[in-house]
Image: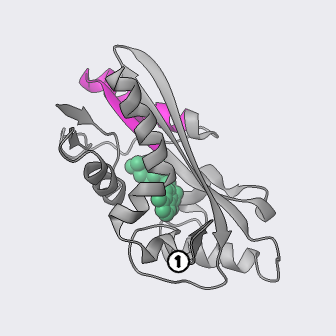
Amino acid sequence: KKLVFATNNQHKTDEIRLALLGQYDVLNLQDIGCTEDIPETADTFEGNASLKSMYVAKNFNLDCFADDSGLEVEALNNEPGVYSARYSGSRDSMENIRLVLNKLKGQANRKARFKTVISLMLNGQNHFFEGIIEGTIRETLSGSKGFGYDPIFQPNGYDITFAEMDMAEKNKISHRAIALQKMIDFLKG
Ligand code: ITT
C-alpha cells in the first residue's frame, strides 16, 4: 500500500519510512513530482500541516498526510514552536540551536517538548493526529544523528539526546512516532 507524505524534509521521510517499513510505501513530494515550496503561513501546527496536505490533495488529487512539528521551550513562552524550522531567520540547524541556547543562558528551567501534528487528507476530509514528547534542553550539544534540535533535546527518562539515539530508538518514543501510530491505528480502523 502507498501513502503520500507531503514533506521536503528528508529526515522526516526517513523516520516515517522506517516506522512504516513492511506496512506502507511512503512517497514524498519529490517522488510525486511536486516541486512547489508550499507556503507555511499559518500560526498553528494544525494550520501549517493542513496547508501542506491540502495542497497535495487539491493539486494532485491524492490522499495524503503532512507533518508540522517543532520544539516548545517552556521558559521561552513555548518558542520556537511553529517557527522552529527558521527560528534564527535561516534554516541552518546550528544557528537555530545556538539561538535557543543563548536565550536559555542562565535559565534554570530547561523544560521543553517536541510536538508533531499530522494532517491526513482522506477522501476530502481532514483528520488530525498529535504526538508530544517531554524533555529538557541540554546546556551543550551532544550527538550527531537525527536533525534539527536533536543534539540539545534529552527526553525524560533518558540520559542521552535524540542525536545520540539510532533512528529506530528515537522512533520508539518520538513525537512523530506517537502521532504516526495514531494515524496508522485510524487507517486500520
Ligand atoms: P516540511 O515542512 O517539508 O515537512 P520542515 O523541516 O519545514 O519540513 P516543519 O515546518 O514541520 O518541517 O518544521 C519543523 C522544524 O522543527 C524542523 O525543521 C526542525 O528544526 C524541528 N523539528 C521537528 N521535528 C524534529 C525532530 O524530530 N528532531 C529535531 N528537530 C525537529
For the stretch drawn in magenta, the main secondary structure is helix
Q: Could you tell whether 124 is left or right of 48 in the image?
A: left
Q: Is mark 1 within 8 Å of ligand 1?
A: no
Image quadrant occupied by the C terminus: top left
Q: Label 1: few (<14), some or many (≥20) within 10 Å?
A: some
**Which residue occupies the extreme front position in the image?**
157
Answer with the quarter of the image where residue 57 lies: top left
Residue sitting at x 64%, y 40%: 43
Vertical order, 115 against 181 (above or below): below
Please name the residue shown 52% across and 67% down the image: 90
| Horizontal arrangement in the rendering, residue 173 relative to residue 70 (left or right) | left
Q: In this view of the protein, can residue 39 be seen by the observer? A: no
* Residue extent of the magenta highlight: 47-67
**Residue lying at 35% horizontally and 70% vertically, measured from the top left:** 166
Nearest the viewer among 153 and 82 is 153
Q: Secondary structure at mark 1?
A: loop
Residue 17 image offset from top left, x and y in percent: 26, 50
Relative placement, left or right, of 41 versus 181 is right
User: What residue type is disc 1 on?
Assistant: Ile
Report x, y in % for residue 21: 21, 48
Colour treatment of the image: one colour
Q: Residue at x 19, y 38 (%)?
A: 32
Residue at label 1?
160
Q: Is residue 13 visible?
A: yes
Total numbered circles: 1
Where residue 16 appears, x then y in whole percent? 32, 49
Q: Nearer the viewer, residue 102 or 187?
A: 187
Q: Is residue 100 above or below residue 183?
A: below
Q: Is residue 56 magenta?
A: yes
